[in-house]
Each structure stands twice: as structure tokens, then as C-alpha cells.
Image: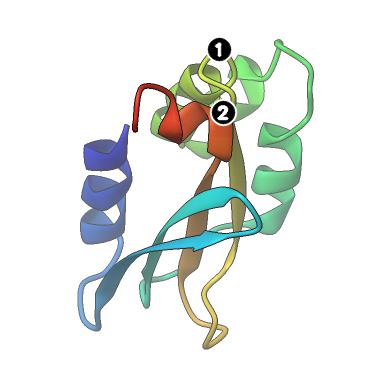
Amino acid sequence: MIRNLIDNANKFTSAGQINIAATVSNDQLILNISDTGKGIDMNFVNHLLLPSHDNYGYVEEKSGLGLMVIKNLCKPLHIKLEIGLAPNGNGTSIDLVFEKGDFTSGVS
């Protein structure tokens, strides 16, 4: 999943940078991958993040099958997927948000 996000960032960033960061905040681990690439159509993002399971027709039109796969992997793993513009307004920013219980189980 993480490799796919980094590959997508690399594919759509011909010049600029890709940043990967992890932070812990409010009992959550947040893994952020952002880039300064061409960005993502927010209409596509809004459609992708709908709870409906029937998004494949739209995805085929717009491309982005990789994000659909990531969305479908996140749900059973209880990972929240957040997609938006990069902090500088250019490019894409994607957060994978893990709740504390999901990333600390088994840790003493």
C-alpha cells in the first residue's frame, strides 16, 4: 500500500519533491505522503471516498485504480484514508491514519 502511494507520487511528479513523514498525535499514527506533482482532481477524490462499493466505472474513466485498491485495503485494516492538496497548494497529500490500538497491539 505504501509502496503504491510512493510510486504514484513518483509517477506524477516530474520535477519537485516527494515527502514522507510519520507523526503520532491524539493516539493516532499518521503516515503522510505528499508531492509537488500535478495534483489530483478533487471531484475524483470526493467520488472515490464515497462509502459506495460501486466506484469502478468512475475510476476507469478517470484512471486512479491504484487509489481504489488502496481504499479497499484500508477499510478491513481500520486505516483512515485522507486525500487532499499538498500543504503548499501544489500536488497531492495523502494521509494513512492508524488508531492507537491498531499500531500498538503487542507492544510492551
Residue pointed to by mark 2:
59
Is 9 left or right of 97, judged from the image as shown? left
Q: Position of residue 64 (x, y in %)?
A: 46, 36
Q: Secondary structure at mark 2?
A: helix
> Residue 1: x, y in percent?
32, 31
User: Taking 90 as reference, is 101 above or below it?
Assistant: above
**Residue at left 73%, top 50%?**
43
In whole angstroms, how far apart are the C-alphas of marks 1 and 2?
21 Å
Mark 1 or mark 2: name the one nearer the start of the chain: 2
Name the disc covering residue 76, or none. 1
- Identify the residue shown where x is 23% and y is 55%: 11
Q: Nearer the viewer, mark 1 or mark 2?
A: 1
Q: In front: 21, or 3? A: 21
Quadrant including the C terminus: top left
The residue closer to the viewer here, 29 or 45, is: 29
What number is the disc on residue 31? Answer: none
Looking at the image, residue 80 lies above or below residue 83: above
Which one is in front, 95 or 98?
98
Taking depth in this image into account, of 61 and 27 the one nearest to the observer is: 27
Q: Is residue 81 above or below residue 33?
A: above
